[in-house]
Image (spheres, coloured by chain):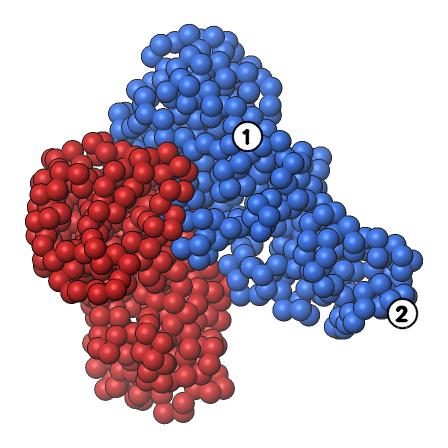
Chain colours: A blue, B red
Amino acid sequence: MFVAVMGYGTVGSGVAAVLKQNGEAISSKFGCENIQLKKILDIRKFPGDEFEDIITDDFNEILNDPDIKIVAETMGGLHPAYDFVLALLNAGKSVVTSNKELVAVKGRELLEAAKKNGVNFLFEASVGGGIPVLRPIYQCLCANELSEVAGILNGTTNYILTQMITQGASFEAALSQAQELGYAERDPSADVDGIDALRKICILSDLCFGKNTPPDSAVASGIRNITLADVEAAKALGGVIKLIGSAKRLPDGKTAVTVSPAFIRSGSILSVTDDVQNCVTVRGNAVGEVSFSGPGAGKLPTASAVAADMADCAKHFGINRSPSWDEGSGDNIVSGDDYVSCWLVRAKGSKDEIRKQFPGVGFINAPGLPSNELFFVTEEMPCGSVKSKLESAGAQTGSIIRITDY
Amino acid sequence: MFVAVMGYGTVGSGVAAVLKQNGEAISSKFGCENIQLKKILDIRKFPGDEFEDIITDDFNEILNDPDIKIVAETMGGLHPAYDFVLALLNAGKSVVTSNKELVAVKGRELLEAAKKNGVNFLFEASVGGGIPVLRPIYQCLCANELSEVAGILNGTTNYILTQMITQGASFEAALSQAQELGYAERDPSADVDGIDALRKICILSDLCFGKNTPPDSAVASGIRNITLADVEAAKALGGVIKLIGSAKRLPDGKTAVTVSPAFIRSGSILSVTDDVQNCVTVRGNAVGEVSFSGPGAGKLPTASAVAADMADCAKHFGINRSPSWDEGSGDNIVSGDDYVSCWLVRAKGSKDEIRKQFPGVGFINAPGLPSNELFFVTEEMPCGSVKSKLESAGAQTGSIIRITDY
């Protein structure tokens, strides 16, 4: 069975490499037809590259080739990825993708198109890179009513926080190091502001709760405000700070979605997920809690997830095996200032004024905590209440960190 | 689509409960036909039970009912489970099971029978209880050449070791406690001697390396010899002791299989897998390392995996989706005394004599280690060499613990 790859960047070139190296093993192990790479789409030229002969800059060579049954989209971004994928599905080809923005924003629509055309749209690589996450949730946990999904979904920020926690590096120093190592972009906003993690938690929310979660209906707060003092305060409380994306079913049927720095107790699996590793934890009414961890990004890990989706499409060509979820405008999403939790707060201000606003609160003392900043844990309340109470107390907010029970 | 359950014990009654509670959600979420429980097989009577009306002691009522398309085998043991399952597959019914002994010993044969009859034989629940492990390995990691699979595969022994590590309980006290809590049988041999874990690592080896691994071709050493002194020595080395099942591809194409107490470094995911939790780690040439963790046993977790397999059978009735592996007599298995590793050894004897046998070895000192026992780490060598060297040194062996790199 012939396949094509669109986008010959990090992931796309990894897919080509994995298909070349493990292609025969895939088909024999998985019992699908042999997968042969026929075309690679990229507007750039790659002189001397081993796949030079099959690289084209003309999308129509893939769209109009009846031999090509499965296409991997590894271009990233919304356009032209969306337009190409929709055209391919409508032409009766199955599509797999590693593009979280595409799935988070256009996933529902593309799944509908796949279903209508009797083909598949699979996207295991869009969350957790090489870690099996989506298929296990969708297939293996299908006998559960799921209540919550949460995880470390961004390797760049996890690397930065790990450097802060284990090496005592400042945020700025850790970010520079991540950039030097190629873990962070020159403009690191999508990672450090939680945008990347937000797309992934929205996909997980779609899948776990069966209703569309538009990324613009939820709010991410990243790790720019996190200081070494926060790391110390978390340590004093017996845990670590991680950037956690979480989606949780509320009793009223709404879904609480957040990406924010979060306190994780020491000894949990999320707490030992370090460096660029990712980890996703799911809670269900029959299984209790299960976790999936491993490399959340990287050329070959991500490519291995893309290639496995291609094998699944090859084995089940003509049988729709993709998940689906209902429409959702985002009006059932609780996020941002409305998100309810206990919070670890750092602020500059008067103890007395803060005590007036947060009655009964105890301040955290630990060696290493700066004397001009106050640390305390609130009762359960909306994030917005924390902010307005701090304002009423005349305090200057340093950081507001969600306390979790993972 | 009508289904049946054979064996109304812990898991079987859990399957009935999960199908009743989440049945409609399963079919709507997963897009399969509604699954309706028609018969339960058990030789016992259950007066007053909510499923009393559909419980039968006659296997033929299931075998000969053309409406029943899928059967869950949750009886355990080899006979009559094997005979029933084979008859059902040959009658064109799909079968799912939580029975690790059946899969470890007869899996290959039953998979062949399923394939021949165009039905499925699935067994996600046989390893790791409710944790998605087998399907993620088989499907999501199919683009990898796998090199190693290892894990904490038995909740009872992990509970005992956790009590020893965190509470300072002796093996005997921890075992009693596990028995009181219902985690351990009155005769705990299958758990504490590693027999249960061995069956599971054999199934993982079958699946990961594509060749049959008969349980009687590999050797398990359990945790009866583990003392609090071993726990202390491991702590001094920066880790913990866990009962680990492992299967590893060797350069000569053979497979090294073992179940043994093992040293795990602190901070790894296996090291924080406590109490009755299980965790499986897999290594592949594209993905690197991924881990799956959660409840490795228990009524509802295991039932949720059985029910998900039933949903998969329902969605793909008539399409063989089961994995397969080649025949293997066990002559390619390296285990027991031939298993090569570095070892943490506890022995009583003369330092000088031990140094003669293990040149250059350093002894471990730590507060809490008994003065009449010696602790040291060997170079890489077969387990049998450790034993014969200790004998040559006139030393009395206490424990031999595998040093791992997980």
Picture residue at 78% right of the left edge, 71% below the top: A360
Badge 1 marks a residue whose secondary structure is loop
**Front one among A12 and A103:** A103
Picture residue at 40% right of the left edge, 42% below the top: B25
Asked if residue B391 lies left or right of residue A356, the reply is: left
Q: Is residue B342 visible?
A: no
Residue A307 on image: x %, y %:
39, 31
Q: Residues within 10 Å of mark 2 (few under 14, many from 20)?
A: few
- The residue carrying mark 1 is A327
**Do discs 2 and 1 belong to a common subunit?**
yes
Q: Amino acid at mark 2?
A: Asp
Where residue A403 sits, quadrant-wise, is: bottom right
Q: Is residue B308 visible?
A: yes
- The residue carrying mark 2 is A352
Picture residue at 47% right of the left edge, 65% below the top: B272
In which quadrant of the rendered image does the N terminus of chain B lie? top left
Residue B367 on image: x %, y %:
49, 86
Q: Amino acid at mark 1?
A: Glu
Badge 2 marks a residue whose secondary structure is helix
